[in-house]
Image: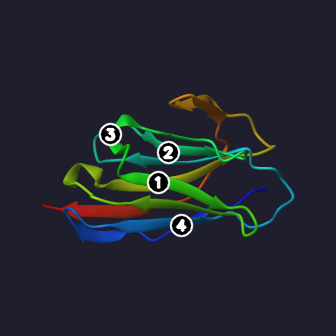
């Protein structure tokens, strides 16, 4: 079973930066897709950024140019660098991965389409104006 755990959330003023981390320990399974989603109160969960094992990335239009997704393959840690944060970025952020296991609905973030079947508990990001 793949376990993922997020960290790095917090409160920041508009224009500030945060870096989220996601540990996915163990290397038994290939993780071809990993991604960050977010969900604000009263809104549906939305994809933020995704990365493939070949390093290809994709972003939601709302975060392009401000957020950057990356992965340390040796440590199985996923990152989300968030710059120029806005109050509308306030949400619970979730790390997710596609790995062999239970089936899941396919979800798209731009051209990257994966069946994310392992999810973390989330880390809160709050941006004040």
Label number found at residue 49 = 2
Query: Which label lies toward us, 1 or 4?
Result: 1
Tell which circle, 2 or 1, labels the residue nearer the N-terminal end: 2
Question: In 3D space, how far apart are the residues under numbered discs 2 and 4 (Cα atoms)?
Answer: 13 Å
Tell which circle, 3 or 4, labels the residue nearer the N-terminal end: 4
Q: Please report the residue visible at 33 percent of the width from the left and 60 percent of the height from the top.
A: 83
From the viewer's perspective, tell me whether residue 81 is left or right of residue 25. left
From the viewer's perspective, tell me whether residue 61 is left or right of residue 5. left
Query: Which label lies toward us, 1 or 3?
Result: 1
Q: Secondary structure at mark 4?
A: strand
Within 10 angstroms of label 2, few (less than 14), some, or many (20 or more) residues? Answer: many
Tell which circle, 1 or 4, labels the residue nearer the N-terminal end: 4
Question: In 3D space, how far apart are the residues under numbered discs 1 and 4 (Cα atoms)?
Answer: 12 Å
Residue named by callout 4: 21
Label number found at residue 62 = 3
Residue 84: quarter of image: bottom left
Q: Position of residue 76 (x, y in %)?
A: 71, 64
């Amino acid at each position: 079973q793949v376990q993922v755990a997020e960290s790095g959330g917090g409160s920041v003023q508009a224009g500030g930066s945060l870096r989220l981390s996601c540990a996915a320990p163990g290397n038994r399974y290939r993780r071809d897709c990993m991604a960050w989603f977010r969900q604000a109160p009263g809104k549906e969960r939305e994809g933020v950024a995704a990365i493939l094992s070949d390093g290809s990335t994709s972003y939601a239009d709302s975060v392009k140019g401000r957020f950057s997704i990356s992965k340390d393959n040796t440590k199985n840690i996923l990152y989300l660098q968030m710059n120029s944060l806005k109050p509308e970025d306030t949400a619970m952020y979730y790390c997710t991965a596609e790995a062999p296991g239970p089936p899941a609905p396919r979800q798209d973030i731009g051209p990257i389409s994966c069946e994310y079947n392992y999810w973390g508990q989330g880390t809160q990001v709050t941006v004040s104006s």
